Amino acid sequence: MNIEQIISELKEYKGPERKIMEVCGTHTASIFKSGVRSLLSSGIKLISGPGCPVCVTPAAYIDRCISYAMLENHILVTFGDMMKVPGTAGSLSQAKGNGAKVELMYSPMEIVDRAERNPGTTYVIAGVGFETTVPAYALTIEEAVRRGVSNLRLLTALKTVMPALQWICENETEIDGFLCPGHVSVIIGSAAYEDLAEQYQKPFVVAGFEPEHILAGVYDIMRQLQTASGVEKGVHNLYKNAVRTEGNKKAMSVIERYFEPGAAMWRGLGMIEDSGLYLRPEYAAYDAGSKGLDQDIELPAACRCGDVIVGRINPNECPMFGKACNPMNPYGPCMVSSEGACGIWHRNIGML
Amino acid sequence: MCIAIPGKIISIEGHRAKADFNGNLVDVNVGLIDAKIGDYVLVHAGCAIEIMEKDRALELIELFHDLDELA
Ligand code: SF4
């Protein structure tokens, strides 16, 4: 098997239309950058999933971030992706323009140093992310505890991917197969998808981010879908260089030491039991009040973000796309984040 | 948001390491992996989350071999 054979088979596919969801925004971005779509038969549809933690974070969370940034002696620290996401009264970036104290971080762990150097200031870390990022927050708390740094808090909007995938399998039955999120899988392991694959009899393929990885993943899913019914569909790991069957156990255990599951709100999907991670009661002193931030903004009536996030429509099927809604003037969160499907599609408009 | 990028470990001191990303040296926490100097690691948010065992070319050869077994 080589890449040319894969490309020609995928181009010449003439069977029934298949929908494959790439769960994570990093895949969406890479699919566009590498032009993978143009290599596929029109019978193979790639749909973007909910795998951008920024896009599924409700507005109440942004509002809380802003209110901390306005408090005296407080600084809100965040990854850059969050800056432009709209809350009910604007974004962090707008708030910063109005005097709110917002700083960027490369890693939450560096905030332990910043907080130690500035004992009079409370650093509130905007802890957004999936399993890939949670270990970094856990190590941050571990370090803060170890060094006795107490002027640091986590405001979490942490989510785990499996409950959302379960929701999608249950509610969006048209999706034929899943390209699993590669870097989430590094942590949780490819075995994590086995129950879903078995229960819903759908292929789950873990793939990396190079164009060859993605094409191989799509090919594998199509292969599995073409085999006779009765043949088990399953989990295949095509990113063995980074993803182990069992994942990174040290990372999983550090997550478990500091966080416990709880209900969380996903834009587009709603409340999902046990799909969030919250600091354990033992570490409540480090929590900036992360529970209950469930209210979302009323999206403009025409904004179809909710449908985009679960793959019911492609961004360009939204009537606002590229017209009233564009990266300079985003209506919905999916247009804002660098890994939001609408934004990625818009930046690559020439390739549609 | 969940992107992790590979860098090469240059030095290690406890859980703190320096990794080289195309000539930029960056502080990386290696507490979650058993890294040694010279390893290529995947780094996300300042944290090394896994060791990459093979170079890209070798990885792709093995990937296509795996697909053969499916066919
Ligand atoms: S294009 Fe804009 S308005 Fe339409 S779904 Fe995307 S973010 Fe919402």
Image (tube, rainbow, N blue to C red):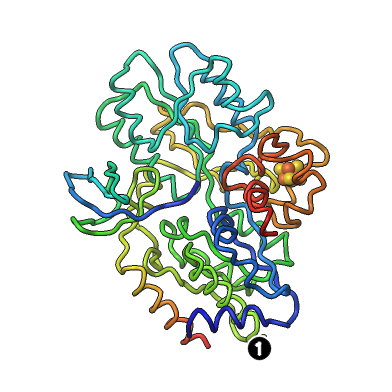
- Judging by the rendered image, the residue that carries numbered circle 1 is A228
Q: Is residue A222 above or below residue B54?
A: below
Residue A300, located in which quarter of the rendered image?
A: top right
A241 with respect to A198 (left or right): left
Task: Where is residue A275? Give x, y as percent.
Answer: 57, 48
A187 with respect to A57 (left or right): left
Identify the subunit bearing mark 1: A
Task: Where is residue A339? Give x, y as percent.
Answer: 57, 48
The type of residue carrying mark 1 is Ala
As helix, strand or loop, the secondary structure at mark 1 comes to loop
**Residue at the spot x=39%, y=70% of the render?**
A240
Task: Where is residue A48? Give x, y as percent.
Answer: 65, 57
**Residue at the spot x=42%, y=27% of the render?**
A153
B8 with respect to A129 (left or right): left
Q: Is residue A25 above or below residue A91?
A: below
Residue B25, located in which quarter of the rendered image?
A: top left
Q: Is residue A171 above or below residue B17?
A: below
Task: Where is residue A123? Give x, y as percent.
Answer: 41, 23
Report the front residue among A310 and A210. A210
